[in-house]
Amino acid sequence: MPSTRLTVVPVKLSSLTETLHISCFSDLHVDSSLCDYDRLRRIAAERAQLPHHHAIAIGDVCDLVLPGDLKRFKPSVRPAAVATRDDFLRASIDFAIERLKALGLKWDLISRGNHEDEAEKRHGVDATSIIAHELGASCGGYSGLVHYQIEVSGYKCAFTIAYHHGAWGGKYAKGYIGAREWFDHLWGWDVAVYGHNHASRLDVELRQELTWTRRGMEIRDRRVFIVNCASFVDYANANGTHYMERRGYPRQPSAPPLISIRFIRRGTPDGRRLEPDIRIQV
């Protein structure tokens, strides 16, 4: 399955009172012995009960720290179920697929992070495309857009998530500062999500846009959201050695951001415009 920079997801709602829910996961590392899978499974079960719930994963779904990686590999890094397998790459991918399917979520996107990229460079296998295919999801790149096309009560509108797995340092600085600079290159998104830094964070900002109202053309403020997704590494069992802590990020509970959107009518000349009313829980 080739990767794509743009994923389009059609969504049909019955009325304007219904809410679209989207969970954004990053750094699941489901094939790592340090993955807090019990917590991940509990959160997924809660989220799956929400109406119109979708899920996206923006990189490092797999740990894929394998014997060829002399910098990071040690025998204890892999779960016991796959530690003794000779076909170590296939074993890790199959293990990840099994764990992700067991979460019972509707996956729209599985995209790659630095761990998947590193494994592909070392072993020549695109784990992201295999996992995305098995989950019935789009295979994303290191960055891209997820564009939700909404149809509700005869109205049509859209909601767009920009994503980038993230990098230690970015172009100028690590974390939010680097992410903000990167996302400023894109236009038209409502929420931007990034990972890799392993700490939940929500920043609300304003963008100015030219829009058409019943009074004519106006410049109007529009809220946008930049969100850092949490990791599911079990920090309590990492004995203070996980690189998240060494990079200056304190230990935090693992909880993927939950984006909840309702669509409201706006006064436009044709009276047919909907806009997303966005709430985000981190």
Image: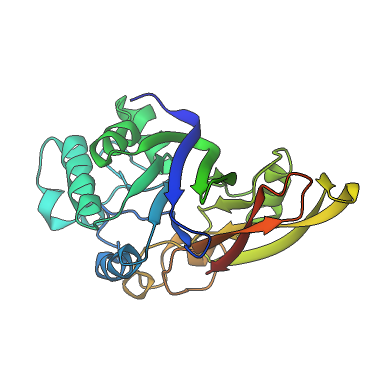
Q: Position of residue 2 (x, y in %)?
A: 38, 24
Q: Is residue 237 visible?
A: yes
Which quarter of the picture shows residue 140?
Answer: top left
- Viewport quadrant of the N terminus: top left
Q: Nearer the viewer, residue 96 or 32?
A: 96
Q: Residue at x 52, y 41 (%)?
A: 149
Disc tally is: 0
> In the figure, 260 relative to 180: above or below?
below
Q: Nearer the viewer, residue 174 or 160?
A: 160
Which quarter of the picture shows residue 91?
Answer: top left
Q: Residue at x 27, y 55 (%)?
A: 32
Q: Position of residue 268 (x, y in %)?
A: 77, 49
Q: Residue at x 39, y 53 (%)?
A: 54
Q: Residue at x 52, y 65 (%)?
A: 199
Q: How is the image coloured?
A: rainbow
Q: Position of residue 165 (x, y in %)?
A: 52, 46
Question: Is residue 171 rendered to the left or right of residue 143?
Answer: right
